[in-house]
Image (tube, rainbow, N blue to C red):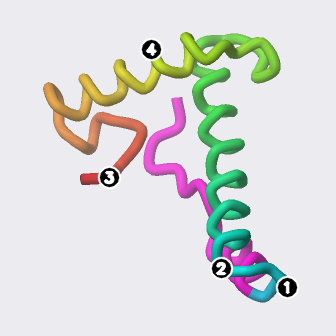
Amino acid sequence: MINNQQYLSQEESMAVEMALLTSQEKFLTRLTISSLRLLKVIAEDLQMDINDLTPQQIIAWMEKDSKVRREEGIEKAVLKWE
């Protein structure tokens, strides 16, 4: 599993910022790129193809990561938000 992964590089963020998009569209674009990266991490962790992930598997993975964050600390979790 990949820890401390940055889901949107500074270069990508700058490219989105320079795109001819509204603020809402820029936000959605950043979110979409970050989501793709996270789905790749989830699929790798579950040892399956990203196209085979189900909403239930994603929810279960998020619950597991949340539990790790609560019980073992933020540094042990994949997602690093507070």
Magenta segment includes 12: yes
Q: Nearer the viewer, residue 18 or 7?
A: 18
Query: What amino acid is labelled 2 in the image?
Result: Ser
Q: Which mark is residue 60?
A: 4
Among numbered discs 3 and 4, the one appearing first in the sequence: 4
Residue 69, percent from left and from top: 24, 34
Task: State the extent of the magenta-drawn residues as a range.
Answer: 1-17
Residue 67, percent from left and from top: 25, 23
Q: Secondary structure at mark 1?
A: loop
Q: Residues within 10 Å of mark 4 (few under 14, many from 20)?
A: few
Name the residue carrying label 3: 81
Q: Nearer the viewer, residue 65 or 18?
A: 18
Cα distance in 3D space between marks 2 and 1: 10 Å
Cα distance in 3D space between marks 1 and 3: 29 Å
Name the residue carrying label 2: 23
Magenta segment includes 5: yes
Residue 46, percent from left and from top: 59, 13
Residue 12, percent from left and from top: 73, 71
What residue is at 69 percent from the left and 33 percent from the top? 40
Number of numbered callouts drawn:
4
Locate residue 14: give its quadrant: bottom right
Cα distance in 3D space between marks 1 and 4: 37 Å
Cα distance in 3D space between marks 2 and 3: 23 Å
Q: Secondary structure at mark 4?
A: helix
The residue mark sitting in front, 2 or 3, is 2
Name the residue carrying label 1: 20
